[in-house]
Image (tube, rainbow, N blue to C red):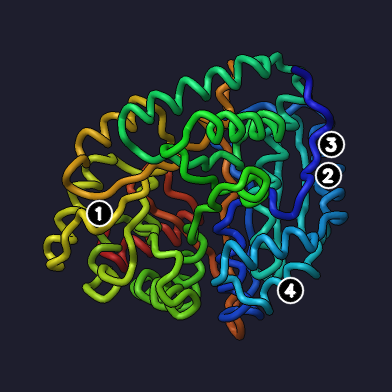
Amino acid sequence: MTPNFPYIKSLLDNDFYKFTMQQGVIKLFPRSMARYEFINRGKHIFPAGFADLLRKAIDNLVNLSLSLEEKDYLAETCPYLEPTYLDFLQGYTYNPAEVIIEQNGNDLSVKIEGYWYRTILWEVPIMALISELFYYTNDSEAATSEEIISINKEKIEKYAKLGVTIADFGTRRRHSYLVHRMVIQALEEYGSGTFVGTSNVHFAMRYNTKPIGTHAHEWFMFHAAKYGFKMSNSLGLEHWTAVYRGDLGIALTDTYTTDIFFEQFDKKFSKLFDGVRHDSGDAIEFAEKTISHYKKMGIDPLSKTIIFSDALNYDKVERIANFCKGKIGMSFGIGTDFTNDVGLVPLNIVIKMTAALPENQSWIPVVKLSDEKGKYTGDPKMISLSKEILGID
């Protein structure tokens, strides 16, 4: 299956949490700026001319705009997205000048800088383009359409037998738009009662399923830059509730380790938020900590939900489900194992916020610690400082 030249075809071909965070940034931090950078974790080799092709694909995004049909869909499906924000989004256009792309031999450099409320939308489509272009330029032979449908039919039927709910979180490292579309088709057709939605807003609209997401690490990373590491979680959560008033109630825990998060996730937040998301570290250990925390707060863990989303496959989901069953609510967001299981090696790549410029301040490096030490990202001096301030060994 040879893909056509990769282009992003819809402004909504992005993860839902980018739009929900964008509304929050516009309301609370409209003058703040941000920098992002591509990180090639897998040390993948990019062929000569790759940067030029990526530049062509990114420049094409300037032609995207929110259609009236898409705007009406968001207004009906997501009532917490305010009319003023939807009007803004209807007028939003990507500015390719915010993205600097360079290539030195086989090494690819991508940097993004601009107002945070604008640049926040770049990460996901750029990652999707890098991934799809990588296979396009390598002329890699992927599974056939029939095989992709069959693979995902088998997967969702196995998940159904586990009695769990599953969502697609695979936009960023998908093999291609076409593969992603076939995956959603298969999950929707064969996963009734098990497949509950996708992080991709375009496909959620196209296949009449739920767009899923709340916020990402950058929300808390920015709060650390503006207010300090000790206040990043509590003010990040406070500001989220100020914008969404109880909607979109899954809190991300591991920006500065889950242990630090739970110290600040007091009874008010524990009751208000519907649950938490696991994104790094041992899932069973995380579940134990979460159950213990809710019990300590006098809250029945079965009234709350953990969304597991860290590099999941069937074996991991089965292990987690067997542990959590009867103890706490659970759901699973599966990414690359859905959208890039086509017989090729998936890319291990990320784009992360590297610095923030809060209004009336100076540029400040930002970091993410997570629950897996090997996944720390950011300036080494700032990582050391954050660990010292937060008392992390």
Please tell me which of labels 4 and 2 falls first in the chain.
Answer: 2
Q: Which residue is pictured at 70% across the width and 44% down the height?
A: 109
Residue 239 placement (x, y as % from top left)? 45, 77
* Residue type beneath disc 4: Phe
Q: From mark 2 to mark 3, how far is it between C-alphas?
A: 5 Å
Which label lies toward us, 3 or 1?
3
In front: 350, or 205? 205
* Residue type beneath disc 1: Asp
Please tell me which of labels 1 and 2 falls first in the chain.
Answer: 2
Q: From mark 4 to mark 2, how far is it between C-alphas?
A: 26 Å
Q: Is residue 228 visible?
A: no
- Kindly check if marks 2 and 3 are in contact, taking CB atoms under 8 A apart as contact: yes
Q: Is residue 26 above or below residue 173?
A: below
Q: From mark 3 to mark 1, how far is it between C-alphas?
A: 43 Å
Q: From mark 4 to mark 1, how far is it between C-alphas?
A: 44 Å
Residue highlighted by disc 3: 53
Callout 1 crowding tier (Cα within 10 Å): few <14, some 14–19, many ≥20: few
Please tell me which of labels 3 and 4 falls first in the chain.
Answer: 3
* Residue 311 position by quadrant: top left
Q: Which mark is residue 88?
A: 4
Please tell me which of labels 3 and 1 falls first in the chain.
Answer: 3
Q: Is residue 8 visible?
A: yes
Q: Which mark is residue 55?
A: 2
* Residue type beneath disc 2: Arg
Callout 2 crowding tier (Cα within 10 Å): few <14, some 14–19, many ≥20: some
Give SS at disc 4.
Answer: helix
Residue highlighted by disc 1: 393
Q: Which residue is pictured at 22% across the width and 73% down the height?
A: 267
* Residue 76 position by quadrant: bottom right
* Residue type beneath disc 3: Leu
Q: Which mark is residue 9?
A: none
